[in-house]
Amino acid sequence: MRERVRVTADSPRELETPRPLAQSREAARSGHSIAEPEAVYVYGLMRAQLKLAFGCLVGFLATAGSLAVLLTTMSVLNEVILWGVPLSWLLHAFGFYPVIFVFALIYATAARRNERRFRALKESVE
Amino acid sequence: MTSPFALPAVALVLVITLILGFAGVRLSRSTSDFFVASRSVRPFWNASAISGEYLSAGTFLGLSGLVLLSGSAGFWFPIGYAAGYLLVLLFVGAPLRRSGAYTIPDFIEARVESRGARQLTSVIVVITGFLYIVPQLHGAAITLNVAAGLPLWVGAVVVALVVAGAVAGGGMRAITAVQAFHYWLKLFALLVPAVLLLIVVAGDPSPPDPHLAFPESAGPAGADLYRTLSLLMALLLGTIGLPHVLVRFYTSPGGDSARRATVIVIVLISAFYVVSSTIGLIARIAVPDLAAPGAADTAVLALPSRLLPGVLGQVVTALVVAGAFAAFLATSSGLVVALAGVVSQDLFGGTVRSFRFSAIACALTPLLFSFLTLGGGLVSSVGLVFVFAASSLTPVLLLGVWWRKLTARGAIAGMAVGAISSAGSLIGAKVVPRNSWWASILEQPAAWTVCLAAAVIVVVSLCDRSRRPRRADWFLSRLHVPEAPDAS
């Protein structure tokens, strides 16, 4: 089935007016924190996503950092010549992108799973 | 080095850009299942468009120049740009899409509920954008000078006028088709010469000594640790604060699709950087004589006619010129759209007429700056933009998305400290003696300015507890709660 989706920007005016979740409309209107059970899940989701993001960041920095240390300290890599270019140069030019991609993929998949879990939890309460 | 096909190629790119741009509204309506509604295609084209806008003169011309000039340290720039998108994905991508904000000032105002914070953000966004447009115009100037023998100012004026006209006319207003076209043109325009040059270089019966073309001192082992780390910090964090990145998320229907598009963006820009880095390596083998400041940025343009015979060399040169122009146009039009939105809303109340006026002003002001500053290396001037954005905007965006206790005063203080310390340090680096120990600290200040700005935001916000935005909890839940399943 095809469906049209129009993508438009909210005007800043709209942004200033809360568009609360249906369940927490009253609480949001009055400007206080959102309804209690909902809020617990939201904070849980935020914590999970932040933990995931930091986990991926640390993993990425550790992997890329080790590769960088390897490149700068292993003079053997400079002696191996492939297609007329030292291996250390080739690794520096091309080696980091796969690392970036792998962590991007891990994050996107896991973040999606976190959100699915959040939705399931919310539905089970309702 | 000049090619008779260069000017027709530039004209063709301009014409296709304008046709796609002005017809874009109609086109995307009649093929809406292709560009808008069909979910399976959508993140891919959206990602092509984001990549098209992101890949600028800095990486198209500048990267090979830098690799030629200063060795493998140049590779840190594209690695940092690509990893910068990883950080966008990890920390702000989906939340910023869900915020409903169209520009960074919109987001800050909605988050901390303060006009003052909004105005300061707008000023910083406009400065960042101007700083980023200037190297694009320099790139255009160099390109037409080298490939068509025109005076330096011509290229800069052409790009500035086309962008001003097209954005003011409504032709390039975040039209996915134009930006996506530019991405594929850029990739193709470097891939074809890269393959042909590789064939030529591989067939060379007496290849140069690898240890002469790639000396160990210019390799990965020769880098300065502090400078490299500080530079990488600026590149990684700077992407989050770039004015034209947030706008593009808006073309994703929801948070999750924004994330998927970002993953594809990482693949697409990495593919481009791999090709561009390959040309940098070829340049070290084939045109070591261009390794001088100023000349190095022309390496990509010079390579085809040096290595390929006759007409083939000229045609490939023209293709490279076309790709380079796509880079200047895509990035500067993306920036001008973002800046004109900010300027027209903050100064003139956001009417269509004021948007047009602002677009022209935002394209022509950097043109004046570009005349004053012609001659700096492309990559390093783009690097300065990342330092400034990473110090002034990134800390407040990150804390705004993840930290409930952020207040308007904290945001204002942090942005001001980040902007002033990074700008001051970059200017200071010009006056101190080059080899003193603190020259590095001033030239690559991101490592301390980012931390300083973040610390100021946290301390001031904590001291300002009574003024926490009333709707902070509601706003954060809006950023992080996924849309209903059918919208993602």
Image: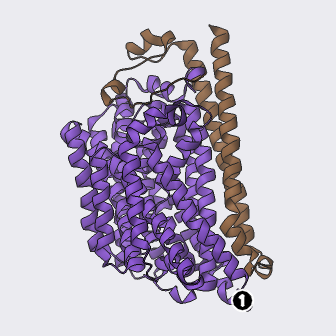
Q: Residue furthest bottom?
A: B206
Q: Point out residue B468 in the picture as x, y percentages from the top left corner.
A: 38, 29
Element under label 1? loop
Relative height, residue A88 to residue A53 (above, below) = below
Instruction: Decide if residue B177 is on the left or right side of residue B128.
Output: right
Res. A5 visible in picture: yes
Instruction: Decide if residue B317 is on the left or right side of residue A112.
Output: left
Instruction: Decide if residue B409 is on the left or right side of residue B178.
Output: left
Seen at 57% across and 76% down, the residue is B67
The residue under label 1 is B207
Q: Which part of the image, by quadrant, shows the C terminus of chain B? A: top right
Relative height, residue B121 to residue B143 (above, below) = above
Report which quarter residue B142 is drawn in.
bottom left
Relative height, residue B419 to residue B293 (above, below) = above
Seen at 38% across and 13% down, the residue is A29
Q: Point out residue B404 in the picture as x, y percentages from the top left corner.
A: 47, 31
Which lettered chain is shown in brown?
Answer: A
Q: Point out residue B234 in the picture as x, y percentages from the top left corner.
A: 50, 59
Task: Identify the subunit bearing mark 1.
Answer: B
Seen at 52% across and 52% down, the residue is B51
Characterize the local packing of mark 1: few (<14), some (14-19) or many (20 or more) Cα atoms within 10 angstroms.
Answer: few
Seen at 56% across and 20% down, the residue is B484
Instruction: Decide if residue B211 is on the left or right side of residue B103.
Output: right
Res. B403 visible in picture: no
- The amino acid on which the numbered mark 1 sits, given as a three-letter code, is Pro
Q: How many marks?
A: 1
> Residue B439 versus residue B366: which sits nearer the camera?
B366
Which lettered chain is shown in purple?
Answer: B
Q: Residue furthest top?
A: A126
Q: Residue furthest front?
A: B311
Report which quarter residue A79 is drawn in.
bottom right
Relative height, residue B275 to residue A99 (above, below) = below
